[in-house]
Image (spheres, helix red, strand yellow):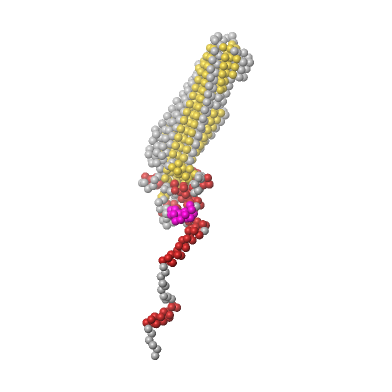
C-alpha cells in the first residue's frame, strides 16, 4: 500500500501537472523604483535622444494650442515647437496669407517678408496677433462645426458664410469685431457699418485681388455714425449696377462715408462702373476718413468726391483713368491730400469748386485730358510742392472767381499755359517753376518768388508780381489792366496797359528791357534795367508812362527811346 499524499504534496503535484496549461504562480511584487525605471528611460529618450526630424514629424500633426502646450514640456520641445515651418503650415491653413500679416496695433496691418523680419518666427507672432478674429469663408462653417474632433483646440474660432452674418455676430457680442474675409466674390450683401469693426481680406498672393466685394443695387459699403476707427483693408470694392446710367444711382457708391465717422480704408482696389455717381463719396460734417494706399481707377464718373464740410486724410493713393475728375472737392470740403498719384484722367485731375478747399501736398498730377488742377467759383485750395505736368491742355486753371495758394510747385511740359488765370480770379502763386502764366478777364493774382519764362496779362487783369524770375512779361489786349511788379527779375516787359513796376531787375533781354506801346501807361519806378539788346525803355504810340528813379545802364542800343507821338516822363536816372 502506498502512503497517503499530504496536502502540500498534492498541491505540489497539482502545480506540476497543470503548469503546461498556462496556470503560473504569481510573481513577487517589485519595488516602485524598479517599476519606474523603464518609464524614466523612455521619457529621457523621447525628450533628449529622439531625432529632431522624428519629433518635428510628430509635432506636425498638432494644432496650435496643442503645440503651445507641448512647448512647455522641456527646453528642447520649446525650441522644436517654435519651428517656423510648423507655424507657417498652421498659419496658412487658418489665414491663407503667403506672407505674415502683422497687426501691432488697432487699425494697422502690413505684410512682412519672413527672411527680413526682426523676429525668428513671424508666422507665430502674426498668429498670436490675429487669433481672436472671426472668419467669413463660404461653405466652410458647416465642415468646421460638424468635425469637432478634427478641429479640437480651435473651438474658440468662429466661421460664417456671409459678411452680413459676421456683422450680426459683432452686434451680438460673439467676438471683438476682427473679421477675416477669405478668397471669393461676395455679391449684393447689405454692408452698413455703425461700429468700430475691423474687416480685412485674407487670401494668398496679392490679397486685394482675391477678395472681391461688389454690389449691383446699392452702395457697397456705407459707414454711418458710430463707425469711428473702423477699418477696411486688403480687398477689392466694386459698385457694378446692371443699369449703369440709372439716375437713382447718383446716390450709390463703392464707399459712402457719412456724417460723424472716421473709418480707415487701406490697401483697397476701388472700382465703379456707374456713370452717375462717384466711386468714393465723403459727405457731411464730421466725415473724416483716412484713405491710404488705395487704387481708385477706371471709374466711369468721379473717383473721389469730398463735399459738404467733409474732411479726411488721403495719402499715397493711385487715382487714374477716371471718366470725370480724379478728385472733386466742393461746398467747403477741406481734405488733406498728400503724395497721391493722379494721372491719365479722361477729364481734369483735381477739380475744386463752389467754395471747396483742401491742402494738397507732394502730389504727382500728370497726363490728364484737361487741366491738371482746376479751381472755380470761390474755391480756395492750398497746393504745395506738387508736380503738375504733361497735361493735354494746361497745368493749373483758375477761373470764375477762383482763388487758391500755389506754393513751391513744379509746373512743366503742359500743352498750353502752365498757369491760366481768368474771370475775376484771385490766386496767389509763390516759389513756382512754370513755363507760362496767362492772366486775363478781371483776374487779380499775386505772383511771388516764381521762375517762369513768360507771363501774359490782358483783359482787366490786375496782378501783383514780386520776387519773380521771368524772361518775358507781356501786358496787352485791354487798356484797363493794372499790374504791380516788385523785385522781379525778367528779360523783357511789354506794356500796353496801366501797370506799376517797382524794384525790379530787368536785364539781358534779347530785345528791349521795357516796351510800352498802344496807349500804355503806368509807373516804372526804382528798377535796375541793364544789358538789354535794344533800348532799356522804349515808349511808342501815344503811350504815357511815368518813369522815375530807375537805373538804366549797359544797354547795347541806348537807354531810353521815345517816339515823337509820346508824352513826357519825369525824373529818370541814367548811368
The residue under the point 48% across, 26% down is 405
Compare residues 470 and 380 and report the one nearer the observer.
Answer: 470
Q: Residue at x 54, y 32 (%)?
A: 366
Q: Which residue is drawn at 42% across and 45% down?
A: 178
Work out whether residue 219 can be spotted. no
Percent across and percent down for residue 124 are 47, 49
Relative to 47, say whether 239 is above or below.
above
Please tell me which residue is depicted at 44% across the width and 29% down the height of the picture.
356
Outermost residue to the bottom:
1
Is 494 above or below relative to 158?
A: above
Q: Nearest the camera: 327 or 534?
A: 534
Residue situated furthest right in the rendering? 556
Image quarter where the N terminus lies is: bottom left
Report the magenta residues as a range. Answer: 65-82
User: Could you tell whether 306 is left or right of 344 in the image?
Assistant: left
Eyeballing the image, is 546 above or below 37? above
Q: Which of 475 and 263 is in front in this view?
A: 263
Left or right relative to 565: residue 324 = left
Q: Does the magenta stretch include residue 74?
A: yes
Question: Which image quadrant for residue 10?
Answer: bottom left
Amino acid at each position: 500500500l502506498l502512503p497517503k499524499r499530504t496536502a502540500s504534496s498534492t498541491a505540489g503535484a497539482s502545480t506540476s501537472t497543470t503548469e503546461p496549461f498556462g496556470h503560473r504562480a504569481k510573481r513577487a511584487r517589485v519595488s516602485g523604483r524598479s517599476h519606474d525605471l523603464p518609464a524614466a528611460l523612455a521619457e529621457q529618450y523621447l525628450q533628449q535622444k529622439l531625432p529632431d526630424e522624428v519629433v518635428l514629424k510628430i509635432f506636425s500633426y498638432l494644432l496650435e494650442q496643442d503645440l503651445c502646450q507641448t512647448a512647455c514640456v522641456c527646453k528642447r520641445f520649446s525650441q522644436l515647437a517654435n519651428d517656423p515651418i510648423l507655424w507657417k503650415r498652421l498659419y496658412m491653413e487658418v489665414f491663407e496669407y503667403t506672407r505674415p500679416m502683422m497687426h501691432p496695433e488697432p487699425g494697422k496691418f502690413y505684410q512682412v517678408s519672413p527672411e527680413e523680419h526682426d523676429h525668428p518666427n513671424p508666422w507665430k507672432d502674426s498668429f498670436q496677433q490675429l487669433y481672436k478674429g472671426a472668419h467669413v469663408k463660404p461653405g466652410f462653417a458647416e465642415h468646421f462645426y460638424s468635425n469637432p474632433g478634427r478641429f479640437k483646440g480651435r473651438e474658440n474660432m468662429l466661421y460664417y458664410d456671409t459678411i452680413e452674418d459676421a456683422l450680426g455676430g459683432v452686434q451680438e457680442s460673439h467676438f471683438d469685431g476682427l473679421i477675416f474675409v477669405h478668397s471669393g466674390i461676395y455679391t449684393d450683401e447689405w454692408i452698413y457699418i455703425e461700429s468700430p469693426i475691423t474687416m480685412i481680406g485674407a487670401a494668398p498672393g496679392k490679397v486685394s485681388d482675391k477678395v472681391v466685394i461688389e454690389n449691383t443695387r446699392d452702395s457697397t459699403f456705407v459707414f454711418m455714425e458710430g463707425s469711428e476707427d473702423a477699418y477696411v483693408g486688403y480687398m477689392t470694392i466694386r459698385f457694378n449696377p446692371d443699369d449703369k446710367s440709372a439716375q437713382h444711382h447718383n446716390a450709390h457708391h463703392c464707399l459712402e462715408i457719412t456724417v460723424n465717422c472716421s473709418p480707415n480704408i487701406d490697401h483697397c482696389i476701388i472700382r465703379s462702373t456707374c456713370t452717375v455717381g462717384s466711386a468714393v463719396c465723403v459727405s457731411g460734417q464730421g466725415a473724416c476718413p483716412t484713405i491710404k494706399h488705395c487704387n481708385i481707377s477706371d471709374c466711369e464718373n468721379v473717383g473721389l468726391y469730398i463735399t459738404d464740410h467733409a474732411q479726411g486724410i488721403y495719402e499715397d493713393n493711385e487715382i487714374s483713368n477716371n471718366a470725370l475728375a480724379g478728385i472733386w472737392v466742393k461746398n467747403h470740403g477741406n481734405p488733406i491730400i498728400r503724395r497721391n498719384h493722379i494721372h491719365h484722367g479722361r477729364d481734369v485731375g483735381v477739380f475744386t469748386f463752389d467754395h471747396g478747399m483742401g491742402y494738397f501736398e507732394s502730389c504727382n498730377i500728370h497726363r490728364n485730358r484737361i487741366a491738371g488742377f482746376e479751381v472755380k467759383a470761390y474755391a480756395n485750395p492750398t497746393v504745395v510742392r506738387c508736380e503738375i505736368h504733361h497735361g493735354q491742355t494746361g497745368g493749373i486753371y483758375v477761373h470764375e472767381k477762383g482763388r487758391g495758394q500755389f506754393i513751391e510747385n513744379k509746373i512743366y511740359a503742359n500743352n498750353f499755359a502752365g498757369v491760366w488765370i481768368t474771370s475775376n480770379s484771385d490766386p496767389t502763386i509763390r516759389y513756382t517753376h512754370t513755363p507760362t502764366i496767362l492772366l486775363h478777364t478781371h483776374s487779380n493774382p499775386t505772383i511771388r518768388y516764381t521762375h517762369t519764362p513768360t507771363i501774359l496779362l490782358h483783359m482787366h487783369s490786375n496782378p501783383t508780381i514780386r520776387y519773380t524770375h521771368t524772361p518775358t512779361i507781356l501786358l496787352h489786349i485791354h487798356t484797363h489792366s493794372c499790374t504791380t511788379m516788385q523785385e522781379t527779375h525778367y528779360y523783357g516787359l511789354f506794356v500796353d496797359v496801366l501797370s506799376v513796376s517797382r524794384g525790379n531787375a530787368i536785364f539781358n533781354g534779347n530785345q528791349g528791357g521795357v516796351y510800352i506801346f498802344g496807349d500804355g501807361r503806368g509807373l516804372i519806378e526804382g528798377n535796375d534795367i541793364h544789358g538789354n539788346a535794344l533800348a532799356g525803355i522804349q515808349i511808342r504810340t501815344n503811350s504815357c508812362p511815368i518813369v522815375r528813379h530807375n537805373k538804366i545802364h549797359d544797354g547795347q542800343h541806348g537807354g531810353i527811346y521815345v517816339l515823337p507821338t509820346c508824352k513826357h516822363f519825369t525824373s529818370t536816372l541814367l548811368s
